[in-house]
Image (tube, rainbow, N blue to C red):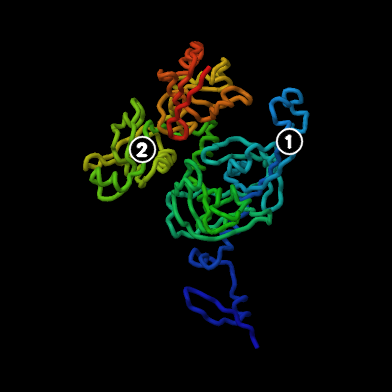
Amino acid sequence: MTRLIAVLFLGFVAAVPLQAAVAARAVPASAEEVRLSYAPLVKRTAPAVVNIYTRRTVKQRRVSPLFDDPFFRRFFGDRGPGGTRERVQNSLGSGVIVAANGLIVTNYHVIEGADEIRVVLADRREFDAELVMTEERNDLALLQVDARDATLPVLGFGDSDQLEVGDLILAIGNPFRVGQTVTSGIVSATARTSRAIGDGGVFIQTDAAINPGNSGGALVDLHGNLVGVNTAIFSRSGGSHGIGFAIPVNLVKGLVAAHQAGGETIRPWLGAEGESVRQDIAQALGLERPRGIILSAVYPDGPFERAGLRKNDVILKAEGETVDDMVALRYRLETADGDRAQVTYWRRGETATASVPLEAPPENPPRNETVLQGRTPFNGVRVINVSPAVVEEFGLTGVADGVLVTGVRRESIGRRLGFRTGDVIEEVNGRSVSLVRELVQLEQDEPESWQIILRRGGKRLRMEFRS
């Protein structure tokens, strides 16, 4: 008796002879037929997805509380049981070939700190890779392999802004070192900016299985185009729970274009701060529902001010796309074409459009990096002047000027008193501090007590010490 197989299609179950089903199997010849099998799509795209192996040497502290004590370290240094030892750390990730000359995009966290990077193609060819460009804030990196005369498969760019919730996609990578793996799913959300994913990031959310080792791999649409770089999962167990995230390819395009032009990526300076419009704010402003971003500060002579925007304006769209938080607004401006972006805003019942110039934040005043050396609470603290460039680089909020702490030397007075990297010193002994040289001058006054006001994590803190 002929064995039967069950074919389920849109809720209809039919019995089909096994031999007939096997004989009828053929490579789909049209887009309609591709919907019944991903095989042709995988054959075209998977060769451009590579495995990335990295090695790095890390220094590891030996566990010995006794020799961690500063008294003993003064005599033994790193030679005692509390010293350090080196070990080699290996890691695995994925990447995507995006240019025929061997340019590969991956996640920054895949290659961070690597001493050696090795790329292995799906056809088992291997190449040494060189790190040529990074964009840590977007978790992206570019690698270059010397392909010489070899022909390399390339995955073309799609348009991540054209994705819609419900679109079918594939995720390709090397999870758990099992080898190249393809998973399918749908787009669950576009331009997701939840802080649960990461600070300052914009992501495509998908239910396609993404696991450790998939980082840097390809998110592919049904046209065979790269639409995202797989980067993270939301998981309590370390495995996929159907909540995965990819960096939109439109951010990758900017990084590749900057590299090919021989320059650096520039994040546009907003010169403004804002927050999502909540229900109470919407009611107070007369908006029909909560939407957009209300500007809480617009800095003098910044791009937003020069475009005619003011404090309490509500930003509704940027480049024609809805924005509901500052991360989404930055993303739309960063991926805008040209040197200006169109921003739609609401003011006192009227909707209007402003043309915002896209420009790099100025470093004015200059940083003037200084390590403070006096016998004061600031001993061992490394500081720089706050400028628009520093605000953008360090992701500071609610800060227009002041002195930023960028490091604190071990075993220094400042370290013992609790200063941290990221602190912004605003006031000392009742006097505002806007520049490093002002802080240096205050140190030289050698007062008997110190009252210091600083900003940490968006909160203002007061610290008091006696000399």
The answer to whether 67 appears left or right of 245 in the picture is right
Residue 344 lies left or right of residue 171; in this view the side is left
CA gap, disc 2 to disc 1?
48 Å
Q: Position of residue 326 (x, y in %)?
A: 40, 40
How many marks can you see?
2
Local secondary structure at mark 1: loop
Looking at the picture, how far across and down is residue 419, in whole percent? 54, 27
Outermost residue, left direction?
Answer: 349
Which residue position holds label 2?
A: 274
Q: Please determine whether, in this image, residue 376 is positioned above or below residue 410.
A: above
Using the rendered image of the protein, determine whether residue 265 is visible from the camera's viewpoint: yes
Q: Amino acid at mark 2?
A: Gly
Q: Quadrant of the N terminus?
A: bottom right
Q: Residue at image x 34%, y 34%?
A: 356
Residue type at tag 1: Ser
| Residue 223 disc label | none
Residue where numbered disc 1 is placed: 64
